[in-house]
Each structure stands twice: as C-alpha cells, then as structure tokens.
Image: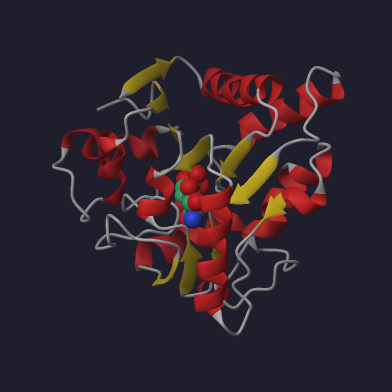
C-alpha cells in the first residue's frame, strides 16, 4: 500500500485526475470505476478541464458506477447516476453506451446485481476510485459486510443515511434506506484502487482504516490487502 499525503485538497484532486488521465491516454480500452460523494468531485472537474483543453480523449472510456440508492430512478435528481452524469459524464466525451450504472429502481434487483457482476467480470476495472464513509464503508458496503461479497443490496446504516443530507436531500425522511453496491470482493478485483480522503472530519476513520485490524467492522480496512492501492490524503485527513 502506498500512502500519499498532500498539502491541499487541490493537490489530491490533481493527483487523482492525473492517474485517470494517464490511464485513459495509455490504454486502448480503459475501465474506471467511479465513486460519488463530495471527495472525488475536484478530480472530476480537473478531468473535464483537461478534456476541454484537448489534452485527453475519453471516447474509449468504459465507466462503472460504484453504488446507488434503491428505489430511486436513474434519472432522479438525487441518484448517484445523475450525480455522475452531471458532474462528469455529460461534460466529457465518454460514450453513453459505455457508462454502466446500477439501477436501484428495478423490480428484480438480484438480476441487476448478477448482470453487473458479469459486466465487471468481462471488463476488469483498471482503476477503482473510492471514498470512505464516516463509518468506514466503501461503496455502500456497511460495517458487517461480507469481505468477499459481490454486488448486492444493503440496508443503509444511520450514519450513511444522515450523510446523504450532504448529497442534496433536504429531509431525512426522503433519504432511501437501502442501497445497491459493488461488493467488497468486486471492488478488490480492480487492478488498482485509489482511496481518497480529505478534510479533518475524515481523520479518525482514516486512522482506523489504516491501523485497525482488517475486518468487516471497518470495511475499508480491506483495501490494505490489495496489492496495488494508493491512499491519497490531504494533510487534514491524515491528521491522526
Ligand atoms: C457515500 C457513497 C460512497 C462515497 C462515500 C464518501 O455514501 N455511497 O460512494 O465514497 O459515501 O462520501 P464523501 O466523499 O461525500 O465523504
């Protein structure tokens, strides 16, 4: 595991964006797993900037979304699919048919999960971008999740439900209580993981992720078992 501690959130964004841009420039069919949340947005903005400057072409990019709410249509303003579309995909030249998202509004979610697993099996993810939830979750793999799990439906825990108020929901009653997520096993199959954390609010969970025993109590501890993972922190997130 490589840990990179940078002075500012801006430098974290630059580091992450350059990892993705370099992959896209050098690989014929680059496959990237994208996370939502506030953490990666700065990197996405820099990718958009690079695209507008003509420095990178995303037409070959295959994109997978990491997770989604259950019971929310893909085009719902608060869905993670909409988040990724508006914050990144609509602003670069990735092809619509190359964007894969988990549809949590479908009746048969087992089928949605199985199909997603197959898709990822056939398109191994080169770089998976990850953030860490306040309770240590990765994607929506909450504490207690199977460390070998595949794409599945989860009951969201209170901390994750409350955190969703930062993602545009105004009332707690509006926040979905279930999520659908790539499993930890699915995430660990990516060739490379980029775990990003910024800000002082993350310093305790970052310390736990890096120092507590690897267990499903803190799902993000599992990343330490990946043989190609970079943890990118700003000074504040690295504070402990
Ligand atoms: C959210 C998402 C994750 C995200 C994480 C961190 O609940 N389900 O995909 O990585 O929590 O979010 P943030 O970057 O806003 O702290």
Depth check, front residue: 70 or 184: 184
**Residue 181 visible:** yes
Depth check, front residue: 133 or 94: 94
In the rendering, at what x and y percent does residue 232 appear? Answer: 43, 25
Please give the name of the residue rendered at 37% of the width and 27% of the height, measured from the top-left corner: 228
Left/right placement of residue 33 relative to residue 85 reads left
Left/right placement of residue 36 relative to residue 211 reads right
Residue at the bottom extreme of this rendering: 107
Q: Quadrant of residue 33?
A: top right
The image shows residue 136, relative to residue 68, as above or below, that is above
Depth check, front residue: 15 or 150: 150
The image shows residue 64, relative to residue 18, as above or below, that is below
The image shows residue 234, relative to residue 99, as above or below, that is above
Q: Quadrant of residue 18?
A: top right
**Residue 69 visible:** no
Quarter of the image for the N terminus: give it.
Answer: top left
In the rendering, at what x and y percent does residue 30 appear? Answer: 65, 33
Q: How is the image coloured?
A: secondary structure
Left/right placement of residue 142 relative to residue 55 reads left
Please give the name of the residue rendered at 54% of the width and 52% of the height, measured from the top-left corner: 120
């Amino acid at each position: 595991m490589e840990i990179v501690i940078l002075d500012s959130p801006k430098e974290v964004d630059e580091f992450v964006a350059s990892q993705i841009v370099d992959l896209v420039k050098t690989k014929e069919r680059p496959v990237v797993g994208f996370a939502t949340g506030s953490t990666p947005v700065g990197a996405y903005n820099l990718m958009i900037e690079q695209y507008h400057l003509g420095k990178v072409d995303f037409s070959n990019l295959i994109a997978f979304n990491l997770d989604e709410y259950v019971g929310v249509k893909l085009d719902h303003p608060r869905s993670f699919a909409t988040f990724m579309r508006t914050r990144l995909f609509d602003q670069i030249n990735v092809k619509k048919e190359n964007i894969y998202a988990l549809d949590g509004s479908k009746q048969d979610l087992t089928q949605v999960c199985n199909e997603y697993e197959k898709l990822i099996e056939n398109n191994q993810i080169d770089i998976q971008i990850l953030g860490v939830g306040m309770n240590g979750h990765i994607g929506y793999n909450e504490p207690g999740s199977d460390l070998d799990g595949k794409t599945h439906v989860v009951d969201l825990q209170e901390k994750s439900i409350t955190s969703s108020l930062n993602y545009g929901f105004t009332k707690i009653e509006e926040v979905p209580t279930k999520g659908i997520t790539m499993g930890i096993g699915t995430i660990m199959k990516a060739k490379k993981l980029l775990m990003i954390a910024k800000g002082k609010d993350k310093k305790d969970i970052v310390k736990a992720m890096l120092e507590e025993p690897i267990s499903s109590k803190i799902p993000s501890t599992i990343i330490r078992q990946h043989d190609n993972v970079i943890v990118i922190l700003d000074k504040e997130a690295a504070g402990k």
